[in-house]
Amino acid sequence: MEIKEIKKPFKPKTQDYETKNFQHVKILDCNQPVSRVIFECWHCKQGLLSEVEGVSPQVLEVACPSCGRTAIRLMANKVLSTTPIPSPWN
């Protein structure tokens, strides 16, 4: 009795290219001197509204008022205010 070994064809593992960490961001009034940015904190997902002045090559880190960590990095001249709001994405 002869035993034949059946080999399965090579099948590469499929990788999940969908990112699991992402941040919601919405920019309003971008053609005005003062723009509004609605976003979620990267760490605690608290909804935040920031008013920023101008666009510049410098990166500003906006701290989250809820958890105290860097919520987002924006390219702006100056962050005028950051206000916690209910997240519009929940």
Image (cartoon, grey):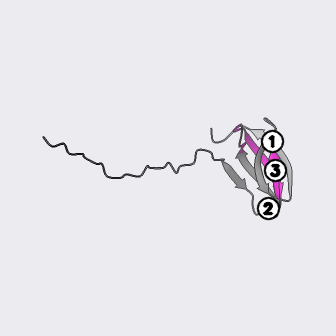
Could you tell me the amino acid type at mark 3?
Answer: Glu
Residue at position x 68%, y 50% in the image: 25
Could you tell me the amino acid type at mark 2?
Answer: Gln
Residue at position x 75%, y 43% in the image: 48
Could you tell me the amino acid type at mark 1?
Answer: Thr
Mark toward the viewer: 1 or 3: 3
- Quadrant of the snapshot with the C terminus: top right
Q: Which residue is mark 3?
A: 61
SS for dot 1: strand
Q: Number of labelled discs?
A: 3
Q: Residue 33 falls in which quadrant of the image?
A: bottom right
Mark toward the viewer: 2 or 3: 3
For the residues labelled 1 and 3, say whether their Cβ atoms are less than 8 Å apart: no
Mark found first going from the N terminus, 2 or 3:
2
Mark found first going from the N terminus, 1 or 3:
3
Say few, some or many: other residues with alpha carbon within 10 Å of mark 2 (under 14 / 14 to 19 / 20 or more).
Answer: few
Q: Between residue 25 and residue 30, name the one nearer to us.
A: 25
Q: Position of residue 58 (x, y in %)?
A: 83, 61
Q: Any mark on residue 7, and which?
A: none
Q: Any mark on residue 83, and which?
A: 1
Q: Which residue is mark 2?
A: 32
Q: CA distance from mark 2 to mark 1?
A: 19 Å
Q: Is residue 64 magenta?
A: yes
Q: CA distance from mark 1 to mark 3?
A: 15 Å
Q: Which residues are magenta?
A: 40-65
